[in-house]
Image (spheres, rainbow, N blue to C red):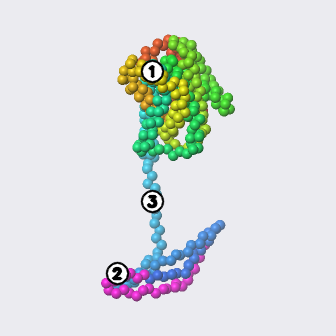
Amino acid sequence: MNCSIKHSSPSISSSNSIPQKGSSQISFKIQYLQPTPFNFNIKPSSITFKKPLYISHIQDFGGSIRKINHGAVCNAYEADHSQPLEIKMDEMAQSEAGQKMKIGLYFATWWSLNVVFNIYNKKVLNAFPFPWLTSTLSLAAGSLIMLVSWATKMVEAPKTDVEFWKTLFPVALAHTIGHVAATISMSKVAVSFTHIIKSSEPAFSVLVSRFFLGEAFPMGVYLSLLPIIGGCALSALTELNFNMIGFMGAMISNLAFVFRNIFSKKGMKGKSVSGMNYYACLSILSLLILTPFTIAMEGPQMWEVGWQTALTQIGPNFIWWVVAQSVFYHLYNQVSYMSLDQISPLTFSIGNTMKRISVIVSSIIIFHTPVQPVNALGAAIAILGTFIYSQAKP
């Protein structure tokens, strides 16, 4: 490496006069140097450095002059104080353990709320067989809860626009149909039977995706549909209290929720709305869609007669049942959407399968639903197929 240094004579500018005694003024003597290039000829490239303007003297109160040392000072900086690998590994393990605990808490809350909802929903429908109004009250309670939460700043309101609501509309329409159909099913058959049929939702998902969207799946996914379909068929054939309206309601609910998921995936890409607020907006729009149909299908006159009958048979507890089923419906769905924000779709699918098991078992115990061994075997096969499907799906 070749270095050449060129010097030039400095040009000195005079400073101010020495200040009088007692003055606080400080005078600087500035030396402007002509650029002194340092040419470092480094092959294959050349780098040039030039000296900047600098202070050569400081004249203090007494008039004495102190020279400034122009020596270049190079300070070596310490390396980044990185933590030992063992500490980082411990922190990662603690973080993973905390995440697993959080997911477990979400699942436990989700399942518990869903079980409570299904119990009170069935109690209400047994005493007040108006599934359209019951479905509407569920959406109304959730909408009211979220509107109050936004108004009181307990939850930050989502930032939405017209395009957001346009993309949400088909999702809300499918959600409304699925919700009403499931409620109609529960009003006609046992809760356990409705959920056994609803466990066949993966079969609808694969068939709709294959024939309507042209998606292809691995062979393992198609094979997993055999136990799902076979188990549901066996359970339906051996159901003691089989009802066609109840069966068709569960099937329509499956189909509607599959389209809801498809519309949701397509329409909500790039939308920065949290799971809680997304479901809140979905509830509000579904309520607006459902209300006119509810009035047309049942009507206030029928509700009045049914309400009086239920109060006479059950007493004031009936009001609590209605409130509970409405509030818990919103809470369990809200927690499920919050869970989906934290976990993968595969984990969510497995959690949904386990949720159905908890609902089926708890409803059989609480309502003393008679179950034949063959019927229980069909339910077990269908749920096992759903679990295999969740593992095989890419």
- For the residues carrying marks 3 and 1, which lies nearer the camera in this image? 1
Secondary structure of the residue carrying tag 1 is helix
Q: Main secondary structure of the magenta part?
A: loop
Report the side of 152 relative to 236 (left or right).
left
* Kind of residue at badge 2: Ser
Q: Position of residue 298 (x, y in %)?
A: 51, 24
* Kind of residue at badge 1: Val
Q: Which residue is mark 1?
A: 305
Magenta highlight range: 1-28
Q: Which mark is residue 23?
A: none
What residue is rendered at 57% in x and 38% in y?
168
| Corner quadrant of residue 237 | top right
Q: Position of residue 151 (x, y in %)?
A: 43, 43
Q: Residue furthest left?
A: 22
* Kind of residue at badge 3: Glu
Dot 1: few (<14), some (14–19), or many (≥20) neighbours within 10 Å?
A: few
Q: Which residue is mark 2?
A: 24
